[in-house]
Image (spheres, grey):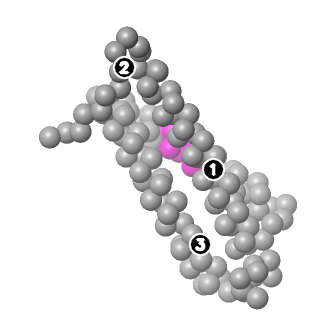
Amino acid sequence: MPLELKTEVPGAGPQLVLFPAFALSGAAALISQVCWQRILFTSFGVDIESTPLIVSTCMLGLGCGALIGGVLADRWRGQRIELFALAKLGIGLFGLASPPLLRAGRNAHGHHPHDPQSS
């Protein structure tokens, strides 16, 4: 039995319900970007190259996600909300897995002079 999501409020358009969800999603994306940036700063240091690299990588991820999401949304028109929720779940799981993955990469890379944990 597929999950049915109510997207309409009686007497209001679906935008009234979906707009806050999309706004919160965007806020979560910005928070995730800042968290990843701070984690990467502790791993690789803060310099003129690291900040644009992190921001441009996040922008690349947003662009690729929009491109792939657009194709999938066109293909499965009736399940757009479910696809969006699934994408958000995947991003959240990746966010949880990122710190251990970055620590493992830092340990494989060795000592870094800007890393207070490796001193």
Q: Is 74 included in the stretch rendered in magenta? A: no
Quick check: 40 above or below 103? above
The crowding category of the residue bearing disc 3, from other C-alpha atoms within 10 Å (few below 14, some 14 to 19, many at least 20), is some
Identify which residue, 14 or 100, lies in the foreground: 14
Tell whether 38 sits left or right of 86. right
Residue type beneath disc 2: Val
Mark 3 lies on a secondary structure that is: helix
The crowding category of the residue bearing disc 2, from other C-alpha atoms within 10 Å (few below 14, some 14 to 19, many at least 20), is few
Q: Which of the 4 image quadrants contains residue 73?
A: top left
Residue type beneath disc 3: Leu
Mark 1 lies on a secondary structure that is: helix
Tell me the residue that label 3 is attached to: 102
Q: CA distance from mark 3 to mark 1?
A: 18 Å
Mark 2 lies on a secondary structure that is: loop
Mark closer to the chain start, 3 or 1? 1
The percent coordinates of residue 66 (x first, y second) are: 51, 38
In magenta, the rendered stretch is 60-67
Tell me the residue that label 1 is attached to: 31
Q: Which of the 4 image quadrants contains residue 101?
A: bottom right
Tell me the residue that label 2 is attached to: 9
Q: CA distance from mark 2 to mark 1?
A: 29 Å
Question: Is residue 63 something that shows in the picture?
Answer: no
Quick check: 101 above or below 11? below
Task: Please give the name of the residue rendered at 70% of the width and 51% of the height, measured from the top-left corner.
Answer: 55
Quick check: 99 above or below 37? below
